[in-house]
Image (cartoon, rainbow, N blue to C red):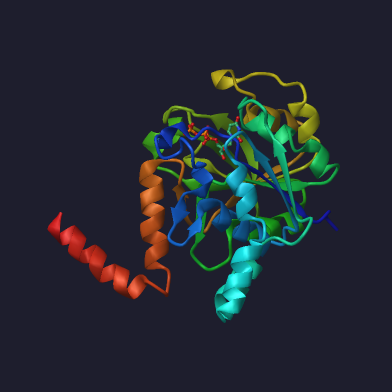
Amino acid sequence: MVTPIRKAILPVAGLGTRFLPATKAVPKEMLTVVDRPVVQHVVDEARAAGIEHIVFVTGRNKGVIEDHFDRQYELEDTLLERGKSQMLEMLRQETMGPGATSFTRQQLPLGLGHAVWCARDIIGNEPFALLLPDMLHKPTNGKGCLAQMVDAYAKTGGNHIAVYEVPPEQTDQYGIVGLGTEVADGVHKIASMVEKPKKDVAPSNLAISGRYILQPEIFELLATQERGAGNEIQLTDSMLKLAQRQDFYSVTFDGAIYDCGSKLGFLMANVAYALANPEISDTFRPELDALLAKN
Ligand code: UTP
């Protein structure tokens, strides 16, 4: 019996420089994909995987994320008065319950590893999920990426990383894993992890996608605060050390991934999610076709 994954970390303290000037005052996680902020899509994915508590690692100018996950009393009251019960119900379902969120600040953007370490006391001594909130994982078969990983984790325990195929000539933009034996359908032991390898030395074209299940021992390794690439405290460096004493598995995600921290990924996500949204796809599709025909 493995320890269940109850808590998730969402690091939202990055500066979002690739999306300036949009992210000057609005956090990139609050940019909207169809009808909800990117971060809400990721929280929905986490909750669908059974996560009960979400730890947001925030920074300055990110207060609006906390407001988004709070109840809006005046709004709810007005909706109730106007008889908009469906809308009210939707808002209530999407709000995390009392005590189910924590917010802690990463005072300086010292890297992803440092952001994760900032959540150590709130997570405590139990395995946890880590979801990078700018990476949207749109599943093919309805089952979210973290839910697929939780299923795999239930069989093996240990640490899990979601991976996806990238074009071989682009391996030098990603963390890449080399696979060992297959332990279940689409689940392999990880034999190696390399940060941004050139195509000719990359162990595969499987990139780390931004979803992890990690054991709490990662915090001891992050605590050394060693700087890595870009003078940042890198999560990958600590995962490599942890891999010397614990098993790491890869779960090949069955779906499409959009990097909403980049302009192209964000635009692609909006199109893909709109085409899949029953409320607007029927009207959006012909509009999109017409636009493409004209441009
Ligand atoms: P990114 O490198 O994609 O985010 O980090 P960024 O720094 O905001 O992006 P650019 O390059 O300036 O546009 C991946 C994730 O890690 C978080 C980010 O918020 C993002 O979710 N992160 C990164 C932190 O929380 N703190 C950090 O110090 C660095």
Q: Residue at x 70, y 60 (%)?
A: 96
How many numbered circles does the render carry? 0
Specify whether residue 264 is in view.
Answer: yes
Can you say which quadrant of the picture contains the N terminus?
Answer: bottom right
**Nearer to us in this view, 233 or 149:** 233
Quadrant of the rendered image containing residue 279:
bottom left
Is residue 191 toward the left or the right of residue 217 in the image? left
**Nearer to us in this view, 227 or 76:** 76
Q: Residue at x 84, y 42 (%)?
A: 124
| Rendered view: 43 above or below 171 | below
Locate residue 239, reporting x and y percent: 69, 33
Q: Residue at x 43, y 60 (%)?
A: 34
| Rendered view: 169 above or below 88 | above
Can you say which quadrant of the picture contains the C terminus?
Answer: bottom left
Is residue 54 toward the left or the right of residue 250 in the image? right
Locate residue 263, reporting x and y percent: 37, 42
Locate residue 255, reporting x and y percent: 49, 58
Locate residue 163, reporting x and y percent: 55, 46
**Nearer to us in this view, 249 or 26:** 26
**Nearer to us in this view, 60 or 246:** 60
Quadrant of the rendered image containing residue 294:
bottom left
Specify whether residue 235 is in view.
Answer: no
